[in-house]
Amino acid sequence: MPDWKIPEDLILDAETLNQISRIIDLQSEWLRNRASSMYVDPLMIELKVRALDSRSLSDIFIESWHPPMEMERLTPEKLKESIEYWKQLPPIEERLKGLPVPPSAELELTSMDALLRSGLLSEKTFDEVLQMFWKELKDRSKVGKERYWSFILADTYKETILRAYITSFLVSYGYATLEMEPMKEDVFLIPFEEERRPVEKKRSFSMPISIDYETWKTMREGKQIE
Amino acid sequence: MLFFKRHRQPGVKGWELKKELGNNYMDLIKVLNSQLEKLDLQVKTISEETELSKKSSEQQLDKARFIITTKSPSSIAETKTSGWRIDDVAALTVTVACIISRQGKMPRGEIEKILKDKFPEWKVKSNLDKFVKIGYLRQDENNLLYLDWRSYIEIDRERLLKLILSEGLTAALAPT
């Protein structure tokens, strides 16, 4: 320690210690593997399998094989359900007739300007709005997470849509993440303390959440009861 | 529930069992296991990639897949006509054994090289693709092959290695 003159010395020593501990960790993993009953010299296995014919290899496989048990048949309940479905299904010609006429105006992508004009966004910059939402989410999720619907729910349907829209950017831009609890069929928002760069494309996924008027109304009524 | 397939995969997730049977579903699985034993069957539990240990957490169990398999391999020794060609089974055995001996991963090119010693190239490639597709193997973006859920569920890996190692010895000791 008396030899440490400048902070860089300390950093270098710490870095060296870190690398040494990593080597020891890898060596320990290697030793554990060699000591396990599954350890076999790869070359030995390669030589053995090259020497064996297909018949012997297949016999070996069968002797160590535990095939899963599966049932591939329809249940009486499923059959009953499908018969009901068939009975109630209108002929295809009728179904095609019933389809709504496509609207004459073509759908187009919205822009920031359009959102500002329609009043969905205020004059504040989008970034400011995002920061405001981020702060609100952090404040509201004291236990680490906040129920998605509680966060986006507002007094009007229009405002709820706007909050959901901004919230989607919070997640996409790495300010928060979504967590789904399949048991409760509930979605939670978890804010990050620091902005995180969006994860690699292959690891990210989309989670569509429907916010139709009926759902909003039900949620709103539920909140008022609470 | 345990017998039916979902999206081409057999078995059921822990959280689905919990939803149907309640929080003490693991106790019921234990009872079921003791009953299945009489039929030479067992419930096996795996996470997405590996077999779960007995001390797994509740969260791990919820995400795990529960599948019924045969308990002893000998009882199905005669069922050799399960739709597989003998060459395909041999290729799978070689691949699984080599991957285990290389600590769980191996470049696809090296496996192909070993298999091409006895099988035509097109057969080797189609076999490996098939093993990946049905869940015996997993391949990453660097073309490394790993064992996948089906290998962990179906194959007694330790026994497989022992049998391969002892096979040569048996042949050498056999009377001529």
Image (spheres, coloured by chain):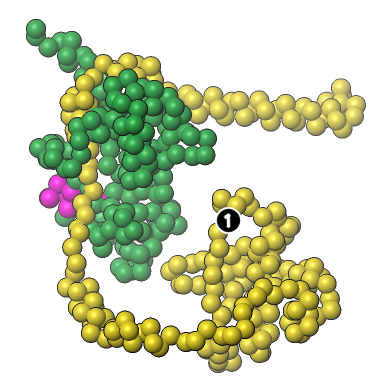
Chain colours: A yellow, B green
Q: Which residue is drawn at 77% across and 27% down?
A: A13
The local secondary structure at tag 1 comes to loop
Residue A135 visible in the current orientation:
no
Pointer 1 chain: A
Q: Quick check: B3 above or below A166?
A: above
Residue at 49% in and 67% down: A181
| Number of numbered tags placed on the structure image | 1
| In-front residue for pair A208/B124 | B124
Vertically, is A129 above or below B3?
A: below
Q: In this view, does A226 lie to the left or right of B166?
A: right
Q: Position of residue A217 (x, y in %)?
A: 55, 90
Q: In this view, does B76 lie to the left or right of A152?
A: left
Q: Position of residue B104 (x, y in %)?
A: 42, 32
Picture coordinates of residue B120 (x, y %)? 31, 26
Q: Identify the image quadrant of residue B131.
A: top left
Residue sitting nearer the eye, B70 or B5: B5
User: In the picture, which quadrant includes the N terminus of chain B?
Assistant: bottom left
x, y percentage for residue B98? 36, 26
Q: Name the residue under label 1.
A: A204
Q: Is residue B109 left or right of residue A168?
A: left
- Res. A48 image quadrant: top left
Query: For residue A17: magenta?
Result: no
Image point (21%, 54%), residue name = A70
Left or right? Give the position of A111 relative to B78: right
- Is A49 situated above or below A113? above
Queried whether the magenta region covers residue B42, the answer comes back as: yes
What kind of residue is marked 1? Ser
Q: Residue at x 48, y 34 (%)?
A: B143
> On the image, which quarter does residue B176 sit in?
top left
> Which residue reaches farthest top?
B176
Q: What stretch is highlighted in magenta?
A: B36-43
